[in-house]
């Protein structure tokens, strides 16, 4: 099997169309199609079902793509380790974390890291789901839970605390709740969406109520920054991570006596990158920055 054809096949399998794969590979649609046809002819099996809405892998195509994905992941890992400078950190570092933490907390601190290590470049992949580090979808992850995979190295980074906020205008109009039970008489803003990035992110819905009997939200929004703006606008009361609430003007910290859950944040990476200088200096940079702010 020709490596170039396998590379084209993998791109098509991931993109689901010749056109999108061609855009990624800088090839024409017809050139991509010819490569796939040649690979199918060489293997004597169909790799895709072709239909008007795109391409679907056949059973044989699924098996081939699984193997190709694993091979390319291992090659990418090996390339990263071979090209890394023995004397100082260099090369590209792919970091993944949740959308809220990455866009609000991490993005504002990346400049200092890259200035300290100018030969390192960074790619930030923000996703509320867990990318597969073993398959090299990212080099390191900052996760709001311990890793589920046994072959990943983990280091506890920090704790994030949930804090209840409202705007001065809202409190002036509706009064300030003194207990969690008082929230029954207030408008609540919750995190919406099918895949909350952090467990217990909507704990305010059941605070002071019987389990399984949550309050209804006046607004649900699947973005922490959007929640902060909605709270600041006076729409209602909501919970934000402490790092966001502290840096957002126009918010009042309320219900300080209510016990809120905390989030354990972990720095996670594959065992193969244990000796990577880029990973080590990024981990140490985060730990030092967190210690300074403690």
Image (cartoon, helix red, strand yellow):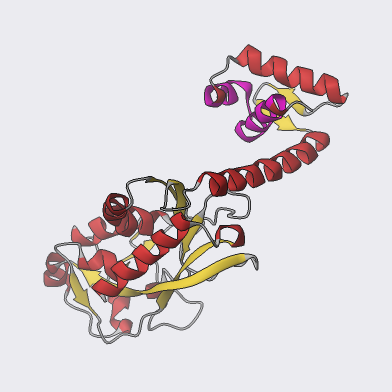
Q: Is residue 111 left or right of residue 217?
A: left
Query: At 43% from the left edge and 57% from the top edge, which residue is drawn?
Result: 98
Q: How many marks?
A: 0
Q: Is residue 97 visible?
A: no
Q: Position of residue 211 (x, y in %)?
A: 49, 81
**Quadrant of the frame with the N terminus:** top right
Q: Is residue 24 above or below residue 244?
A: above
**Does residue 229 show up magenta in the picture?**
no
Please tell me whether the stretch drawn in magenta is mainly helix, strand or loop: helix
> Front-most of 44 and 262?
44
Pick the quarter of the image with the C terminus.
bottom left
Question: Which quadrant of the structure image shows residue 10?
Answer: top right
Residue at the spot x=63%, y=31% of the render?
A: 11
On screen, residue 90 above or below 44: below
Q: Is residue 193 left or right of residue 232?
A: right
Q: In this view of the protein, which residue sits in the foreground, 255 or 130?
A: 130
Between residues 154 and 106, which one lies in front from this camera angle?
A: 154
Q: Is residue 19 magenta?
A: yes
Q: Percent position (x, y) of residue 67?
A: 75, 42
Q: Can you see residue 105?
A: yes
Where residue 37 sits in the image (x, y, percent)? 76, 18
Q: Is residue 254 left or right of residue 290?
A: left
Is residue 256 or residue 99 the one in the foreground?
Answer: 99
Name the residue: 37% across, 45% down: 119
Above or below, 179 relative to 141? below
Residue 174: image location, x then y, percent:
17, 72
Residue 250's quadrant in the figure? bottom left
Q: Residue at x 56, y 58 (%)?
A: 273
Magenta stretch bounds: 4-24
Which residue is situated farthest in the front direction here? Answer: 87
């Amino acid at each position: 099997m020709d490596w170039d054809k396998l590379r084209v096949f993998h791109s098509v399998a991931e993109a689901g169309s010749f056109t999108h794969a061609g855009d990624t590979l800088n090839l024409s649609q017809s050139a991509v199609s010819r490569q796939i046809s040649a690979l199918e002819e060489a293997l004597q099996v169909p790799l895709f079902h072709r239909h008007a809405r795109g391409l679907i892998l056949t059973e044989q195509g699924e098996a081939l793509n699984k193997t190709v994905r694993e091979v390319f992941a291992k090659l990418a890992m090996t390339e990263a380790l071979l090209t890394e400078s023995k004397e100082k950190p260099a090369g590209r570092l792919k970091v993944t974390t949740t959308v809220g933490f990455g866009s609000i907390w991490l993005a504002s601190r990346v400049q200092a890291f890259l200035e300290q290590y100018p030969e390192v470049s960074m790619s930030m992949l923000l996703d509320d789901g867990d990318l597969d580090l073993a398959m090299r979808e990212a080099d390191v992850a900052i996760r709001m839970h311990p890793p589920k995979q046994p072959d990943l190295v983990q280091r506890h980074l920090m704790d994030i605390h949930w804090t209840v906020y409202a705007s001065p205008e809202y409190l002036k109009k509706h009064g300030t709740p003194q207990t969690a039970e008082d929230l029954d008489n207030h408008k609540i803003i919750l995190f919406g969406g099918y895949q909350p990035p952090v467990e217990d992110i909507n704990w305010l819905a059941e605070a002071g109520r019987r389990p399984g009997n949550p309050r209804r939200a006046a607004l649900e929004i699947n973005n922490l920054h959007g929640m902060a703006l909605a709270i600041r606008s006076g729409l209602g009361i909501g919970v934000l991570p402490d790092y966001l609430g502290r840096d957002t003007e126009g918010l009042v910290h309320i219900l300080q006596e209510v016990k809120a859950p905390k989030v354990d944040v972990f720095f996670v990476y594959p065992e193969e990158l244990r000796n990577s200088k880029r990973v080590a200096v990024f981990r140490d940079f985060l730990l030092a920055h967190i210690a300074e702010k403690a």
